[in-house]
Image (cartoon, rainbow, N blue to C red):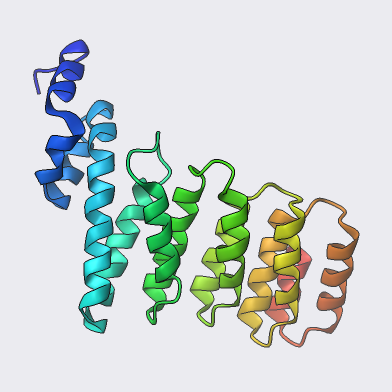
Amino acid sequence: QAASGPHLLDVAAAIGAAALQRFGPMDLAALRVTSATFFQLARGPLMAALSEAAINAGAASKEQGPTQAVALRMLATIAGRGAPACDERHIAELATRCLTDDGADVRRAAVSVLTGVVRGLDGHAAGMAVRYLAPMLADGDPYVAAAAAKALPKVVERGDPKAVAAVLPHLGHSLPCVRRSAVQALADVAAPGDGAVVAALAELGRCDVDWPVRAAVGRA
């Protein structure tokens, strides 16, 4: 606690991130809140520890689903913050595997993790978002679909033609929650005045039998 300024930097440098590999997730989480210096120092080991926890919980049994979801949610809170601190591509691969998990909580947490880490993968963020996040709009769980709709515009630039093309087909999905999520995603991803998107939303707003879908179109 007495260390501050340059002294704290000296302490952090002396400890080194490698030494923190022996710490448990709770110790690393506590260390992160002590200062900005230790936040960055503990970030990599903590993400690695949480990744291992998520993998182990997923491999154990279906009863470990809540544990896996918690580990993923903790990963999501620190993913994409600050400079890359570990193998974030490995974490992205973990998240993509969890997108097909039987548990909706796990899938929703995986969406958050993937959103955070792909932004740190220069040159690959938009492609991974279109490949992995856009299909999650069709998830049968409305909370997962809504999470994907909120995640997509955080990763791709507005007007991205591949992202728009990946979302548009979901307007015709049989589940109303999927159609609503697609409308929300297009409102944030499509370029203003995109003729194809405007026409598709207008038709959906006129013909859809689900009033929340029509309301979402009105807000878009």
Q: Residue at x 28, y 69 (%)?
A: 68
Q: In the figure, 21 relative to 139: above or below?
A: above
Q: Position of residue 159 (x, y in %)?
A: 76, 50
| Residue at 26% from the left image edge and 50% from the top image edge | 48
Q: Position of residue 173 (x, y in %)?
A: 69, 83
Quarter in which the C terminus is drawn: bottom right
Q: Is residue 47 above or below residue 122?
A: below
Quarter-of-image position of residue 98: bottom left
Rendered location of residue 195, percent (x, y): 90, 60
Q: Is residue 164 above or below residue 61?
A: above
Image quadrant where residue 50 sits: bottom left
Left or right of residue 7, residue 104 in this image:
right
The number of discs equals 0
On-image quarter of the N terminus: top left
163 or 149: which is nearer to us?
163
- Looking at the image, residue 124 sits to the left or right of residue 61; the answer is right
Residue 164 appears at what percent x and percent y?
Answer: 74, 61
Determine the residue positioned at 71% across, 85% down. 210
Asked where in the image residue 208 lies, by quadrant, the reply is: bottom right
Please state which of residues 47 and 112 is positioned toward the viewer in this rendering: 47
In the picture, measured across the screen, residue 126 lies left or right of residue 89, that is right
Q: Where 8 sits versus 101, above or below?
A: above
Q: Is residue 33 left or right of residue 175?
A: left
Q: Which residue reaches farthest top? A: 6
Residue drawn at 70 percent across, 67 percent down? 167
